[in-house]
Amino acid sequence: MGDQQPAGCLTGAARAIALVVVVPLRFLWEIAAAVGRFVGTVLHAVFVWPFEMLWRYVLAPVGRVLFVVPAVWLWRTVLAPLGGLLAEWVLVPLLRGFVWLVTHLLVLPLQLLWRYVLTPVGRAVAWLLRYLVALPVAWLWRVLLFPVLREFGRAVAWAWGVAGRVWGFLVVRPCRWVRRELWWPVKAEVRRVLHEVRRALLG
C-alpha cells in the first residue's frame, strides 16, 4: 500500500502536467498541419509544377539531343579506346608501384600498431568504461530514470488522446455541422440563383 500511493500521486501529477502542456500543443499542431498542407499545395502549383513541365518537355529533350548523344558518340569512338591504351601502358604500372608503397609504408606499420599498442589499450579502456560508467549508469536508469520517464510517457499519451477528443468535439464537429448545415445549402442556393440568372440572360 505504501508503494502504490506515491505511484498514484506521481501518475496524477504527470497527467495534470501533460494535459496542461499537450492539449495546447495538439491544437497548435493540428492548425499548423492544415496550414502547411494548404501552403505546400499552393507553392507546388506556383513554383514546382511549371519547372517540372519545362524540364520534362523542353530542357530534357533538348539536353538529350545537344549533350547526351554527342557525349555517347565521343565516348564510344574516342575516349574509351584511348583510355584503354592509357590504362594498359601507364596506369597499371603506376598502380602496382603505389600498392607496393602503401603496403610497406602504411599497412604493415598500422597492423603492428594495432596489434601491440591499440588493442591492449582498447581492452583496458573498455574494462574501465564498463565498471566505472556503464554499470552505474545502467543501475541509475533502472532504479530512478526509467520509472519516472515511463509514468510521464503514459501521462503524455493520455493527454494527447484527451486533446484529440477535445479537438474533435470543439473544432471538427462544429466545422462539419457548419459545412453540412450552412455551407452546402448556401452553395446550392447560390448555384441555383446563378443558374436562374444565366438562363434569364441567355435564354
Image (spheres, grey):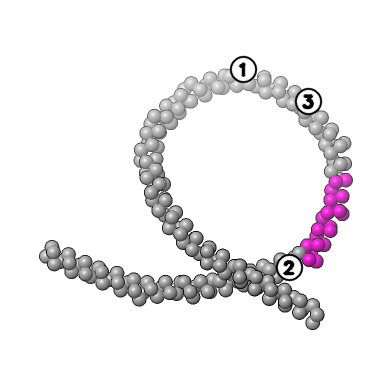
Residue type, mark 2 in image: Val
Q: Are marks 3 and 2 in contact (CB under 8 Å)?
A: no
Residue 117 appears in the figure:
yes
Amino acid found under the numbered disc labelled 3: Leu
Span shown in magenta: 124-144
Quick one: label 1 or label 3, which is nearer the N terminus? 1
Give the crowd class for mark 1: few <14, some 14-19, many >=20 residues within 10 Å.
few
What residue is shown at x 49% (from left), y 63% (from top)? 31
Q: Secondary structure at mark 3?
A: helix
Give the vertical position of 159 relative to 139 (above or below): below
Q: Earlier in the sequence, mark 2 or mark 1?
A: 1
Q: Quadrant of residue 198?
A: bottom left
The amino acid at mark 1 is Trp
Looking at the image, tell me whether mark 3 or mark 2 is earlier in sequence order. Answer: 3
Q: Quadrant of the C terminus?
A: bottom left
Q: Which mark is residue 148?
A: 2
Residue 89, numbered label: 1
> Residue shown at 53%/63% (left/top)?
29
Q: Which mark is residue 117?
A: none
Cβ–Cβ under 8 Å for marks 1 and 3: no
